Image: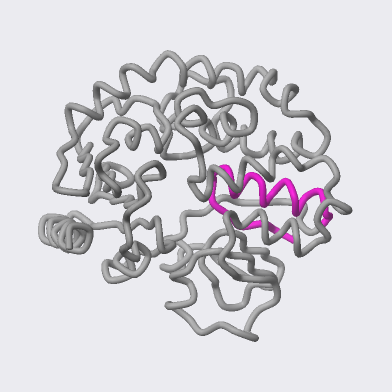
Amino acid sequence: MRLVTRSDFDGLACGALLLAAGVVDHWTFAHPKDLQDGLVEINENDCLANVPYVEGCGLWFDHHSSEFERNQLEGKYKGESRITPSCARIIYEYYGGKETFPNFDDMMVAVDKVDSGNLTIDEIMNPQGWILVGFLMDPRTGLGRWRQFTVSNYQLMEKLMVACKDKSTAEILEMPDVKERIEVYEEQTAKFKEMVKAHTRTEGNVIISDLRGVDPIYTGNRFMIYSMYPDQNISAWIVNGRGGHGCSAAVGYSILNKTCKINVGHLMLKYNGGGHEKVGTCQFSDETMDEGLPKMLKELCELANA
């Protein structure tokens, strides 16, 4: 089967597990919105993981709450969809857990932590092991924007999927393609913080970072902002869309100030996006951005400061 998943740490872990279990033998990475818009052809030979359901797929694994709101899919698919810290956790348990995957303990702990944002300040500021790999592979960290690497992020995802099966955490971190990314990540952390401060404002409980038109966007993990703004409990991270067109907004609970109560996925759904209770994204086109983005931010601030 072909795996269709996101190009992030959870997608990588899903791929490594499905590959190890002999379920998939090739893969493609897709943006959730492209699947929703019917831009990726899907058939019964496709296994979808951590992406929205597409009718006609052979298997579907997902853990996003807004999927339940979008479709009452019970009984319409093979696979499993429920709320868990990561989609990889569903696949791990579905195919037999530790008995099937004896070498995946460290990776499973890290993917659950990173995907659910269940991290300490020390893990955010000084990531080690698989948590560091998780940050390196997160598109929001921004390493994909730097083109001086020997292989692309896409190619590294493929390498790591295969390597996960039989390499230790230490061996993964010593892979030359991983090491060169660690160097860039570490040298850009200070620049990232300065950039965030220059383009961020707060409105009550909400951190709003608007990086449209900012070039370059330095590399930094998505959780660092919460250590910089400890009094706020939710953030909106806005960047230009693909090819500089429109924009995307990623909204998420602070993982350090855990006082937010709004349903982010539900709000994003109103703006043609989706997500979980605690995190979600939506996109705006050039035509809808000027009206839609301020409207979404206004609603977010009203909900978060109620």
Q: What are the residue bounds of the magenta stretch?
A: 1-22
As rendered, which of 88 and 223 lies closer to the eye? 223
Image: 84 above or below 127: below
Based on the displayed image, in which of its 4 quarters is residue 278 positioned? Answer: bottom left
Left or right: 54 in relation to 203: right
Residue 50 is inside the magenta segment: no
Q: Quadrant of the N terminus?
A: bottom right
Instruction: Report the side of 101 relative to 306 (left or right).
Output: right
Question: How many numbered marks does the figure carry?
Answer: 0
Name the residue rendered at 51%, 50% in the picture.
116
Q: Position of residue 274 (x, y in %)?
A: 39, 64
- The front one of 196 and 262 is 262
Q: Is residue 306 visible?
A: yes
**In terms of image quadrants, where is residue 195?**
top left
Question: Residue 293, position in %: x, y?
Answer: 17, 56
Compared across the picture, whether 267 is left or right of 89 comes to: left
